[in-house]
Image (spheres, rainbow, N blue to C red):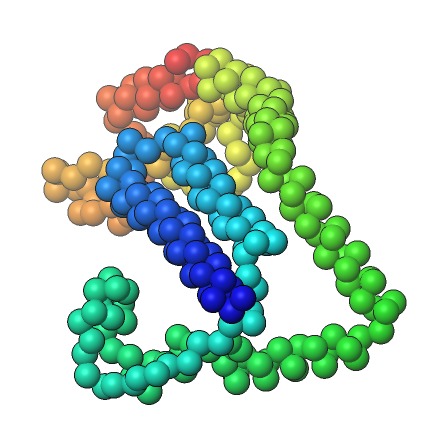
Amino acid sequence: MQQREEKQLEASVDSLISRVSHVKNALHSFIYKLENEYERLTWPSVLDNFALLSGQLNTINKLLRNEKTPSFRTQVIIPLLLSPDRDEDLAKLTEQRVPVFSHEIVPDYLRTKPDPEVEEQEKQLSAEAGRIGPEVAQKQIQTLNKLCSNLLEKLNNPRDDRDADTAGRQNKPSFNPADTNALVGAVAFGKGLSKCRPPGPVAPGHPGQGPMMSGGPTLQQVTIGGTSGQQAGMGGPVAPQQQGKMPSSIKTNIKSASSSMHPYNR
């Protein structure tokens, strides 16, 4: 009877190793495609690889739940030999992942419980969960479910939201037609512009700013040097013999400049 159970256990372990090897090969192939063939990789191909891995994992679960498969939880693994020296057979068997089977790595590879730090954190979380009342816990669960539902709704309908936002931006005017028409009329035809000079006192001794300049921009009289009796620089005193007088050539130039700058003569 015992010998039969040992053979059944050995067959189950061999079958499990074979299934795990298939999963490992599928993972290696998928990772190779992701790293080297990502430019030609299509989304249907990615889904096919995920489906293959999912089917292989489901096969392993069915194998472990089979009635003929012995319970591996009742089996105990005991290390018979520990050595700090390199074991070539072990390295070859584990594909160079475990070259040494020593006291340092055995607790990690043969551990059946989490690390003590992880166990302590789990105890703290369990204690905090126990202190929360049923009503508070139910409210937190409802809030979390609402957040998840809203997130899933946004993820499932991103195109509809984008289309609605785009349509809203397109239908919303980005300018005021009345302001645009007023600006075009003022620039092209002088519509709405004032015909009078801005109010202000007229300085004495500047006949160029008299009534004949109304309707256009004001000009400041500038004396032109070159004769012995005229001012030496702009803004200086005017010679007595020219006070209140302006040469006829300068008057003609000012009249022509005023007429050309008027908005209705452009």
Q: Is residue 30 visible?
A: yes
Residue sitting at x 51%, y 45% = 59
The foreground one among 42 and 95 is 95
Position of residue 112 measured from the top left corner of the image (x, y, whole percent):
51, 76
Looking at the image, residue 185 sits to the left or right of residue 11; the answer is: right
Residue sitting at x 79%, y 56% = 142
Position of residue 186 measured from the top left corner of the image (x, y, whole percent):
51, 20
The foreground one among 122 and 249 is 122
The foreground one among 114 and 214 is 114
* Above-or-below relation of 33 to 109: above
Tell me where residue 180 sits by quadrant. top right
* Above-or-below relation of 144 to 134: above
Q: Quadrant of the N terminus?
A: bottom right
The foreground one among 148 and 162 is 148
Residue sitting at x 42%, y 52% = 15
Looking at the image, residue 18 sits to the left or right of residue 168; the answer is: left
* Above-or-below relation of 34 to 260: below
Position of residue 26 measured from the top left corner of the image (x, y, whole percent):
35, 44
Residue sitting at x 12%, y 38% = 227
Tell me where residue 86 sits by quadrant. bottom left
Looking at the image, residue 158 sits to the left or right of residue 149; the answer is: left
Looking at the image, residue 223 sits to the left or right of residue 199; the answer is: left
